[in-house]
Image (tube, grey):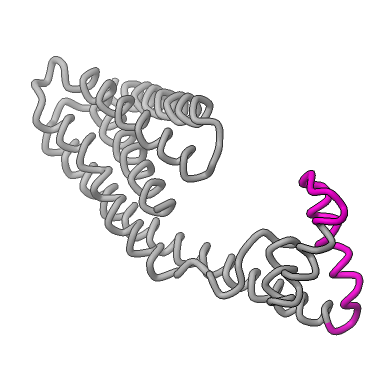
Amino acid sequence: MRAAVMGANDGILSVAGIVIGVAGATTNSYAIFISGIAGMLAGTVSMAMGEYVSVNTQKDAQKRAVARQKQALKDNYEKEVEFVKQNYLKQGINEQLAAKATKEMMAKDALVTTVRERYGFEVNEFTSPYAAAIASMISFPLGSILPLLAITLLPTRIRIIATFVAVIIALSFTGYGAAVLGNANRRQGLLRNVVAGILTMVVTYVIGSLIGS
């Protein structure tokens, strides 16, 4: 889901920046459309490969963490028990209950418990790099369609401002969605995404206009 939302967001923003920048330089609809298509294709491949590499890197790091934790349990089991107990105490659990919970969780699966408490992920629940790559490969062009169609199909006199508005609305949704998935502040996530989109489109339009003039 994270890869899909971010892929759609990047598709909207990247292609919007391209087509608005080209529209600032020329009124030729064919040139604008071709530049948008080129950006869509390049971005789709780039995002898919980027997600594949990124998730694989994260997965490798998690595997190394699991291996380290296995060794830590062999070297000093009691230290790991105390670490888990202290984590429970920091969460506001009273000492007696924390000791009982620690004993039960460590008896059930010491590796799973200590990896979760130390590193914040579940053993053997790794994100698939293939799934992330496919999600990005699908979502990026889907996001790209909005600015591409808006700049191509709308009347020349309003297409830049209309594309600008449509992109801002779309980025509001993806920014909010990304914040929800990341358990972050919704308002800040939405605002940050919209501001980034505005800056991108303004900068590319200004540069395109200067080149076109």
> Eyeballing the image, is 144 above or below 157?
below
Residue positioned 25% across, 50% down in the render: 141
**Along the horizontal axis of the image, is 192 left or right of 107?**
left
Toward the bottom, the furthest residue is: 74
Highlighted magenta segment, given as a residue range? 74-97
Position of residue 139 measured from the top left corner of the image (x, y, whole percent): 29, 51
Say left or right for 123 vs 195: right
The answer to whether residue 149 is magenta is: no
Q: Does the magenta stretch include residue 93?
A: yes
- Image location of residue 4, percent across then percent down: 36, 52
Secondary structure mostly seen in the magenta stretch:
helix
- The residue drawn where x is 27% and y is 43% is 143
- Residue 120 sits above or below residue 142 on the image: below
At which x and y percent is residue 99? 84, 61
Q: Quadrant where the C terminus lies? A: top left
In this rendering, the answer to whether 205 lies above or below 152 is above
Q: Which of 92 and 151 is in front in this view?
A: 92
Q: Position of residue 205 (x, y in %)?
A: 34, 24
| Rendered image quadrant of residue 30 | top left
